[in-house]
Amino acid sequence: MEKIRLGILGVGNMGSGHSRNLLAGLCPDFELVAIADWNAERVEWYKKEITDKVACFSTCEEMIDSGLIDACLIAIPHYDHPKYAMLCMQKGIHVLVEKPAGVYTKQVREMNEEAKKHDVVFAMMFNMRTNHLYRKMHELVHSGKYGRIRRVNWLITNWYRPQAYYDSGDWRGTWSGEGGGVLLNQCPHQLDLWQWICGLPKSVHAHMKFGQWHDVEIEDDVTAYMEYENGATGVFITCTGDGCGSNRFEVQMDGAKLVVENDKLMVWEFEMSEPEFTKINTIPFGKVEVKEFQPETDGENPQHVGVINAWGGAILRGEPLVAEGWEGINGLMLSNAMHLSAWLGKEVTLPIDEDLFYEELMKRVATSRRKTTGKTVFADTSKTYGSAK
Amino acid sequence: MEKIRLGILGVGNMGSGHSRNLLAGLCPDFELVAIADWNAERVEWYKKEITDKVACFSTCEEMIDSGLIDACLIAIPHYDHPKYAMLCMQKGIHVLVEKPAGVYTKQVREMNEEAKKHDVVFAMMFNMRTNHLYRKMHELVHSGKYGRIRRVNWLITNWYRPQAYYDSGDWRGTWSGEGGGVLLNQCPHQLDLWQWICGLPKSVHAHMKFGQWHDVEIEDDVTAYMEYENGATGVFITCTGDGCGSNRFEVQMDGAKLVVENDKLMVWEFEMSEPEFTKINTIPFGKVEVKEFQPETDGENPQHVGVINAWGGAILRGEPLVAEGWEGINGLMLSNAMHLSAWLGKEVTLPIDEDLFYEELMKRVATSRRKTTGKTVFADTSKTYGSAK
């Protein structure tokens, strides 16, 4: 195989963006040969605005059965990610799944099991992991030199979405269409980074507001408290209603504090770890010496293109992925735990009761008033990714 | 009365600091004439190191009965603030109480009731209110031009205290000695500023760790979630264990975001309020225009001296106080609500059940293993106040 023949499933905002990158030659291991989308109008738009040089199908099955593709990038609404990923796997087609991996861990677990049975490269589109700041943070936290994590705080409230956003697709903002709100749509990257850098907590207690800032069914305001096995605590705060939100990720460790904010990583490194210091210090208001610095990084942030290229490298040359497909369940576990905790009004421990989660979700899906405007408005989102601002 | 004759009750770290300011002539309405402290060794130290020109007593009662003082600044351990404040009031002596007002709202409510019966000026040492940044924040939030508060976050973890601090006095870090930890000793200012600027929430759900980072009985790690009547949420995070903590206070409103961090207040002012914007906007990824600026302030931050001078102005000339004595109950209500919530492991609504709080506190006092080292180490804390760093 010289070039991997790629099909894209779903040419909404994300799928069109990926198409543009591929057609611009940014992913040289791939040749974009086909797309599939069940919205005929959107396919017409695609032929006119993006390219008329690729095969167009109205279903994933037809695209797979055409024999044209070796690999499939899945960029459809969340609920169907596992279904089509498994279909591709079963046909020996490599799969890259847009975030989130799915809507509930139960279905994602099934997808992960299916993947083990097939000789395909299964990857997740966790493009934020390619950001040099988060890569460096991951490296420093996992280096071992700063000891234990003690406290994690992520205030990620800069996801402002006006009502027009939720009105732009009848699936948006509904339990039946998305299976959740800001956690499922906006935050999968942060939840993945959280678990990638800091690991999964043992328990979650979340407070949520549903339709607090918008005419929607789902959560648009979340405050989640977490506890780790080692006693560390965490707080994750997010919303889509703040006119001018913040994005500040702080990790406090035994030997350092790390903060990513305003597209900058800063480190406060202690002369010795706090537990060592407090043992030898005799001064009541004594403080450990701290050195503040901005660590050097490679400055690279290849985002979606980086994930697609790593996927290509894995298929052709056995190179490492940015995120293995099976890792998608971790961030979703955090997200599902937050929902379950908020629905039940109490703390939940991880791993959650996946059947109970599914049951509670389906209760909400059953009464979902999924909007029936019929229209879907697409938007150019190409400038909205990748920064840590 | 030309000069107010002042007595200071308690010449530990705080009382000695106030003495130095008074002797340096920074509070011209006052003449420091007496002190009282039951620690004879400390009084000897005071005579030698601070001044031997004032009358020294070993009890508050003696100082009051001496007829030497018109006003008393109370700077003893927390539990006894209301007791001695009431004693002063009953003798017609003006009172300035160090924070916190007391350890439980029940006793502070009694003090507030007592104050109403006497013609004395009753003030609280909420010196952080004199900081120009918080004064400006208070002014902007209360101006009405930014509408409702939606979200409040205060990460105030830069209270690092080594074990030597808790070992420096046998009352430190114990339920019987202090009635609480970081909330009672370090945070009364922030809790007062929180309620002064943002008001009191309707409910609190707090998670606490007791003796997490130190050999102490009390809480040294707190994460508290709050909800307001109007649906706004808040998170207050504090601890005394982080080697290099943070101090970041953010208030998100309908029409602006305000942040105090690193001794700077920044404002992000929206072109129109978010609720107005979302009504008229038709673009799915539309965002309200935001203007970022650093508001002009008078730059002044007179701290303890400012509070004492306002108290003097109130006594002599009827001028306004920085903080009325009765206001001390509000921040303590927040603090007590956090404790009660953590002890009960559930959300509590405000005002809390004060009898239940007292009962729960006394359970802990009864089994308090109050340290019996006997020694008390004093420290110069004069450089540790007032900044918003």
Image (cartoon, coloured by chain):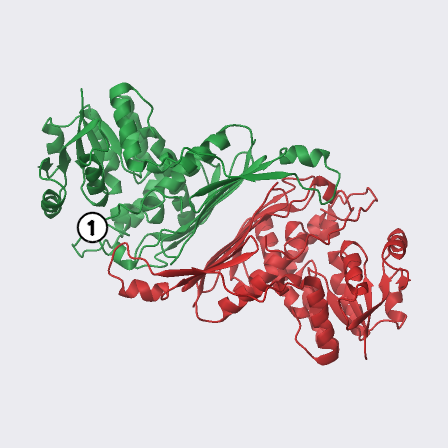
Chain colours: A red, B green
Say which quadrant the N terminus of chain A sits in.
bottom right
Question: Would residue B63 appear left or right of A64 to someone viewing this image?
Answer: left
Asked if residue A353 can be seen in this view, the reply is: no
The x, y position of residue A214, in whole percent, is 67, 40
Q: Position of residue A251 (x, y in %)?
A: 48, 59
In this orientation, which residue lies closer to the viewer: A364 or B212? B212
> Does residue B328 lie above or below A65 as drawn?
above
Q: Could you tell me the amino acid type at mark 1? A: Phe
Query: Residue at point 57% right, 66% down?
Result: A135
SS at circle 1:
loop
Instruction: Identify which residue is drawn at 32% across, 52% down.
Output: B218
Q: Which is nearer the eye, A326 or B202? A: A326
In the rendered structure, the answer to whether residue B220 lies left or right of residue A293 reads: left
Residue B357: image x %, image y %? Answer: 36, 41
Count of numbered marks: 1
Q: Is residue B118 left or right of residue A234?
A: left
Residue A49 percent location from the top left of the image? 86, 54
Would you identify the image quadrant in which residue A71 lies? bottom right
Q: Is residue B220 left or right of residue B373?
A: right
Residue that mark 1 sits on = B378
Residue B382 visible in the displayed image? yes
Question: Looking at the picture, does residue A255 appear above or below residue B238?
Answer: below
Say few, some or many: other residues with alpha carbon within 10 Å of mark 1 (under 14 / 14 to 19 / 20 or more).
Answer: some
Q: Chain of mark 1?
A: B
The quarter of the picture where residue A355 lies is bottom right
